[in-house]
Image: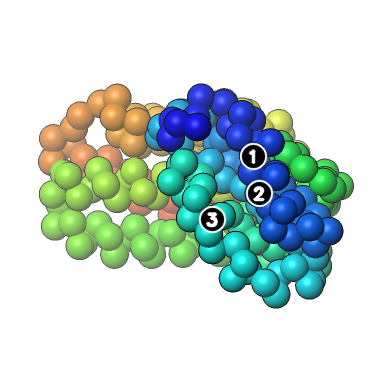
Amino acid sequence: MTKNTKNPKEIFPEIISDYRGLFGDDLISIILYGSAAGQDYQPGKSDINFMIVLSETGIEHLDHAFTIVKKWQKKNVAIPLFLTEGYVKTSMDVFPIEYLNFQRNYILAFGKDILKDLSFDPEFIRLQCEREIKGKLLILREGFLETSGKGRALKRLISQSIPAFVAIFEALLSLKEKNVPGEKRDTIKTTCMVFELDIAVYEKLLDIKEEKIKLGDTEIIKLFKDYLRESRKLSKIVDELGG
């Protein structure tokens, strides 16, 4: 097995065997999620993310997984999310965005499909979107000042923050009962049209993350200020959705 797995499905038999051998009947599901389950997967660059669903008994013995987790980390597999069905059922009001994203982009590798029939209260989605946007806005302002306007630092801040906004955009489209595109750029375009945001700003931010454009310090400062402006605008829009 090479580190740069071309197709994550190739590792299913071995990883299933490892975790079934370890947890036996306490293993409920193994679910591949995130970019590795969709069109954005890039061999050697994208993490391979799994959700390991265990029984209430199995979750008490995570120490048994030390060796297997380390083995798969060496093959570019991220440390899995270990959880139980009970945890999922009792946290959908707290983390609807995360579960929406799981549900939108996953492949069941083994066992019970615990994501298929999840449903979400729209107000819980709206509340988390508002909380996430307002929280990210504070972080962006703080980060902006920490960079002292240096282009390299601003580029890093943009690259680290824009994926979180894409996840929020996907949740907002679900809230508006709009189809969520399979690619990040299309998600950005659709969200900007629905919520009347500046498409050019978010496309440039994604271009920077994907290293498609290079901007000087003055240009990237202006772009970041536009980023803050549009995020503030979106914060107000989502707040007003609550009535």
For mark 3, give the secondary structure. Answer: helix
How are the colours assigned in the image?
rainbow
For mark 1, give the secondary structure. Answer: helix
- Residue 227 seen by the camera: yes
Residue 18's tag is 2
- The amino acid pointed to by label 3 is Val
Direction from residue 205 to residue 133 in the image, left or right: right
Location of residue 147 by image quarter: bottom left
Q: Label 1: few (<14), some or many (≥20) within 10 Å?
A: few
In the rendered image, residue 69, in percent from the top left (x then y), is placed at 54, 55
Report if the CB atoms under discs 2 and 3 are less than 8 Å apart: no
In the rendered image, residue 92, in percent from the top left (x then y), is placed at 74, 62
Residue that protrudes farthest toward the front in the picture? 21
Q: Residue visible at 79% across and 71% down?
A: 56
Report if the CB atoms under discs 1 and 2 are less than 8 Å apart: yes
Q: Earlier in the sequence, mark 3 or mark 1?
A: 1
In this rendered view, identify the residue nearer to me: 74 or 94.
Answer: 74
Q: Residue visible at 46% across and 41% down?
A: 75
On the image, numbered disc 1 is attached to which residue? 14
In the rendered image, residue 240, in percent from the top left (x then y), is placed at 62, 57
Direction from residue 131 to residue 29 in the image, left or right: right
For mark 2, give the secondary structure. Answer: helix
- The amino acid pointed to by label 2 is Asp
- The amino acid pointed to by label 1 is Glu
Q: Label 2: few (<14), some or many (≥20) within 10 Å?
A: some
